[in-house]
Amino acid sequence: MTEKQNSLKRSGSKEQPREKLLRTGLKAMTDAELLAIILGAGSKGVSVLQLGEQLMESAGGDLHNLARMTTEEMSSLHGVGTVKALVVRSALELGRRNRTLPKQNNRIKIENSQVVYELMAPQLLYLQHEEFWIILLNRSNEVLHQVQLSIGGVAGTIADPKLIFKYALDRLASSIILVHNHPSGNVQPSAADKMLTQKVKQAGAFLDINVLDHLILGEGRYYSFADEGSL
């Protein structure tokens, strides 16, 4: 069987992914079927749909887990290889970049914690290490700048309050929001998270820079200090 013939073959009499897509539309497709269409062709002895199913199985059926897999992890699967792994990772990255928020006067306005989550999720959700960011806002709660403050390991990262307020003062920010991720998926704040939040809030009060919130992101969800009354 040639690669072209093998490209979208499915075992038995079941419908091929492209045929199903044309008939039903994108929303009716499974994740494995969409991956099959992205991959375009199978490998020797493995149909393209089997590759899609294998990728989803390796990620526990979760696209968030798939997005966190490295090229090496994907390419180690039977029939995938480096080229196909790069194709899948590129498609997932395009989806990440496509997540945008409406802007007012070319600036995003922060109205609640959900807006913060949607703004920062593309940067933080799929990481296997911790990163700490700050969002600088003007008096209208519009985003002036997003700053990556630090990059750490799996278990934590360092956020220096002096650097936080240096960036805030340099940009003449009226308020700030703290954001970091937990690669474990557990979004409950640690004792260190709570201490840092209170320390930054107190320092901000002296500088007339309000700390509006601190979000912890993980596995498609988040914890908001402001929403939980912990700020």
Image (spheres, rainbow, N blue to C red):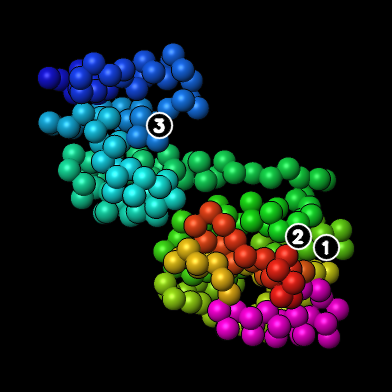
Tell me whether circle 1 and circle 3 mark residues in contact (CB < 8 Å). Answer: no
Mark 3 surroundings within 10 Å by alpha-carbon count, few (fewer than 14), some (14 through 19), many (20 or more): few
Question: Which numbered disc flags the more N-terminal residue, 2 or 3?
Answer: 3
Across and down, in percent, residue 178 comes to 67, 70
Q: Which mark is residue 138?
A: 1
> Which residue is identified by label 2?
144
Please tell me whether residue 204 belongs to the stretch shown in magenta. yes
Quadrant for the N terminus, please: top left
Q: CA distance from mark 1 to mark 3?
A: 43 Å
Q: Residue at x 46, y 45 (%)?
A: 93
Residues at marks 2 and 3 touching, judged by CB atoms closer than 8 Å: no
Q: Earlier in the sequence, mark 1 or mark 3?
A: 3
Q: Position of residue 196 (x, y in %)?
A: 64, 82
Please tell me whether the stretch drawn in magenta is mainly helix, strand or loop: helix
For marks 2 and 1, give the CA distance. 6 Å
- Kindly identify the residue that appears in the image at 60 percent across and 61 percent down: 222
